[in-house]
Each structure stands twice: as C-alpha cells, then as structure tokens.
Image (cartoon, rainbow, N blue to C red):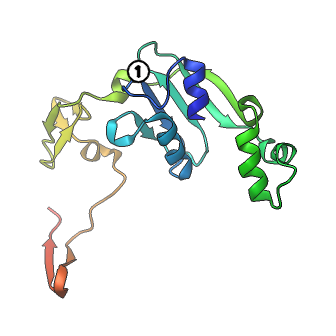
Amino acid sequence: MGLWAGQVLGLDVPQTDKRLFAVVETDGCAVDGIAVATNCWVGRRTMRIEDYGKVAATFVDTLTRQAVRIVPRAQARELAYAFAPEARSKWEAQLLGYQRMPAEDLLSIQSVQLNTPIEQILGHAGRKAICESCGEEIMNGREIVREGQVLCKSCAGTSYYRFVADSTVTVMLPAGAEIHIHTPLS
C-alpha cells in the first residue's frame, strides 16, 4: 500500500523527509508494514491511527495536498492462488501471490479529500498550553478553547477514559517492594 502510494503521488519511499503523511485505519500489523515501506511513523508525526478496523490507509502529499486512499481488493485472497500455483496452503498462496500480483489486482485506490485540513492534523510542533481544568500540559496545538477557557480534549468532553473515584494504584518496584498511591477524585 505504501509503495504504491509513493508511486502514485510521485514521492520516493521510504521517505527521507516528512512530506508523506499516512492515516491508517487499523491498529494491526498493516501499520508496521506501511511504516517500514514509507518511513511514516506516529513518533515522527507523519502517521495517524484512526482505528476503523479496516486494512486501509490514506496517504497525503503534504506539499501538494493530493490524497489517495488504498484498500485491498475483496477478491485478492482468491486471486493470489493464480499467482502462486505452487503454494501448499492458503497462507503461502497469499504470501507469495501478494508479492507477485500487480498492485492494481491486489489493491484499490481512490482520490480523496480530507475533512480536516492537513495543517490541523499535523499539529504545531513546540506549541504548548496548560489545561485550565486539569492542569495538564497540552502539546502541538491540540488544546480546545471554549468560552475563553483553554481545555484539553478530555476536559472538553471527548475523552476515551474516565477517572475512577477514590482509587488506589499499587506500583511494584524491583526487589518486590510496593508503593501504594491513593488518588481521591477531586
């Protein structure tokens, strides 16, 4: 997927700069393959995971703003046998067949437009703010300003977690020692 995206967008992959940006739609092994093929990484802010449970990815040329979404073709698994007749198992047929198949037989590609401008997705490195509700640091311009108050996404109501009231966390230390941290919900 990443190799074909580079070809279609006219970019060398694996990239040596940060021009290519990938949005992957799974949290599985496909992410690792795309990262290695493209040199797009979450830690370099050139990859974002939006887990839709799909082996799919959108690749964006951050200079031209051109974006393409690539997904495996539904019939690729069956077609793999035609490209690997010597395969002794379904797994081996897919392994060999996928390596030999032309990209257009294996994958489907479509031009797309991002709903959020790429500048907002990329964030602003070095920009920091403090949430006026919880006091935690917010990096890369991810703060939300609501009614003049600077908030993190969690305090603004879009959190993936919630605090457990009056909890104790036990931290195991080397050599079997323990520390108990009591955190009352404030």
Where residue 119 sits: x, y (%)? 35, 22
152 lies left or right of 98: left
Where residue 57 sits: x, y (%)? 56, 36
164 lies left or right of 107: left
Observer-nearest of 120 and 45: 45
Observer-nearest of 87 and 156: 87
- Residue at (19% x, 30% y) in the render: 147
Where 35 falls versus 92 (above or below)?
A: above
Q: Residues within 10 Å of mark 1 (few under 14, many from 20)?
A: few
Task: Assign a secondary structure to mark 1.
Answer: loop
Where residue 148 sits: x, y (%)? 16, 29
Quarter of the rendering containing residue 41: top left
Q: How many labels were placed on the picture?
A: 1
Where 134 falls versus 47 (above or below)?
A: below
The kind of residue tagged 1 is Pro
- Residue at (34% x, 35% y) in the render: 45
Q: Residue furthest top?
A: 64
- Residue at (14% x, 61% y) in the render: 186
Q: In which quadrant will I find the N terminus?
A: top right
Where residue 118 sits: x, y (%)? 40, 23
Observer-nearest of 83 and 49: 83
Quarter of the rendering containing residue 173: bottom left
Q: Residue furthest front?
A: 86
Where 73 falls versus 112 (above or below)?
A: below
Q: Residue furthest bottom?
A: 176
- Residue at (33% x, 37% y) in the render: 44
Quarter of the rendering containing residue 9: top right
Task: Name the residue tied to disc 1.
Answer: 117
